[in-house]
Amino acid sequence: MSNTGKTAAVIGAGFGGLALAIRLQSAGVATTLIEGRDQPGGRAYFWRRDGFTFDAGPTVITDPACLEELWALSGQPMGRDVELMPVSPFYRLNWPDGTNFDYSNDEPALRAEIARLNPADVAGYAKFLDYAAGVYREGYEKLGHVAFLDFASMIRAAPALAKYQAWRSVYSVVSSYVQDERLRQALSFHTLLVGGNPMSTSAIYALIHKLEKAGGVWFARGGTNALVRGMVALFERLGGTLRLADPVVEIGTAGGKADSVRTASGWSGRFDMVASNGDVVHTYRDLLGSSPRGRKAGRAVTRKRFSPSLFVVHFGVRGGWPGIPHHMILFGPRYGPLLSDIYRNGVVAGDFSLYLHHPTVTDPSLAPEGCSTFYALAPVPHLGKAPIDWDSFQHEYADRILGEIERRLMPGLRDRIVTRFHYTPVDFRRDLNAHLGSAFSLEPILTQSAWFRTHNRDDAIPNLYFVGAGTHPGAGIPGVVGSAKATAALMLEGL
């Protein structure tokens, strides 16, 4: 690793900020990573309560190769710092009538599951898999790690996008291949994991299916935040500097460039380059609010569509639940209409679609002996759609969610709960400066993708960069790690 003599500040130690900081430090750029919370991770925060370890999320790790590449930059094995364990099935999908569907990359088993629901859809699924492989090749392998800085780059990508009918929704494309409504849901729900509505998110996001099939689904021993800790260990071993519990309050500019960063404690530093892994509205409107560029861009980005928020119930319970796999999706009685309530109507509905996370079935160390750790996640409208008093409503809503899980899956659940707490849209806004409490930043629709998303390098301030969910390619661990690769390439040009 050669020293370039250049310095960089990265704001926000989430996965995107960590991946970018590792890439810069590996390339010899003296990098300072600044995090406002008391520990790194961003949305991958964690808590320890009453002997239980709770991951805030995300909990689905795909494409481990994109993570291994961060260690390989300095010739190190990822296994030195992190152990990834395979998860199978990837998910168990459950419907209110009691139907289960185990989703994995075991091809014969998966086809048997499809045939059990509708034998006629086995052939259609094979065609959908070919389609997903094509959009994975064009949308992820070719475009997922490169920046879109001008409209010409979008024009060059247009033929591939047109070939795969990117203007259609994921649900629409899936429906053209399979007829069973449960299979349509099973093959389209993935966009919810990156903040997208299956009914309106571009069909390009069908690539997630191929991404999981090719690379598997994994979990870090010790919890998702163990992956964060491993990335921090690598970054600091490379000589990087991490500042915790000191939020950035201003990005200073002079001569049309970003030249400094100031934090709440009064600390400040001068840098050759500045990158933000923070919320894009917060970065422009608040951190750059003293500059004309910040005010203008802040107004522009607030007019975009933002992904919904999440309501998460964390609970630790007595007893083991070996029959409940690591990841479950509990579909409600409605699919499309519920998504409309969340994304368009701003209604916190009485029915749910829930993601249930049960990490102790993979790693028992995350709970006291004889106990289990869970969380249940419900997508809900962001605060701009449904300005609910979550401080008053959270306990009632959590009880509804736990009642649904108890009724459908875990009889006697509430009598076994040892500890529980909730994370609401207000917490996303307060802890993460997330605009409108959005859990995934900009909604991943076609007109907010690639060049239409916040650019990896600012258009007016040439040494200001963005990384993470709000920039290209978007949310999810592979997305934000891919954004770090695209942004690092721009920052290292000419060094």
Image (tube, rainbow, N blue to C red):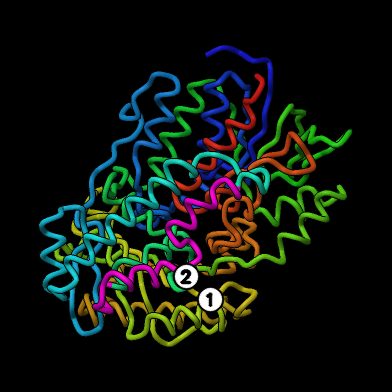
Q: Name the residue under label 2.
A: 197
Task: Judge whether residue 51 can be spotted in this image.
Answer: no
Q: Give the residue displayed 77% in from the left and 34% down from the top.
A: 268
Q: Give the residue displayed 27% in from the left and 46% down from the top.
A: 214
**Could you say where residue 202 lies in the image, as x and y percent from the top left?**
48, 63
Give the Cα distance between marks 1 and 2.
7 Å
Using a 10 Å C-alpha cutoff, classify the residue at mark 1 as few (fewer than 14 neighbours), some (14 to 19) or many (20 or more). many
Specify the segment rendered in magenta: 154-183
Q: Which of 107 and 65 is in front in this view?
A: 107
Q: Which amino acid does label 1 sit on?
A: Tyr
**Could you say where residue 362 lies in the image, as x and y percent from the top left?**
22, 51
The image quadrant that residue 272 belongs to is top right
Q: Are marks 1 and 2 in contact (CB under 8 Å)?
A: yes
Residue lying furthest top in this view? 2
**Could you say where residue 489 lies in the image, as x and y percent from the top left?**
58, 30
Dot 2 lies on which element? loop
Q: Name the residue under label 1.
A: 343
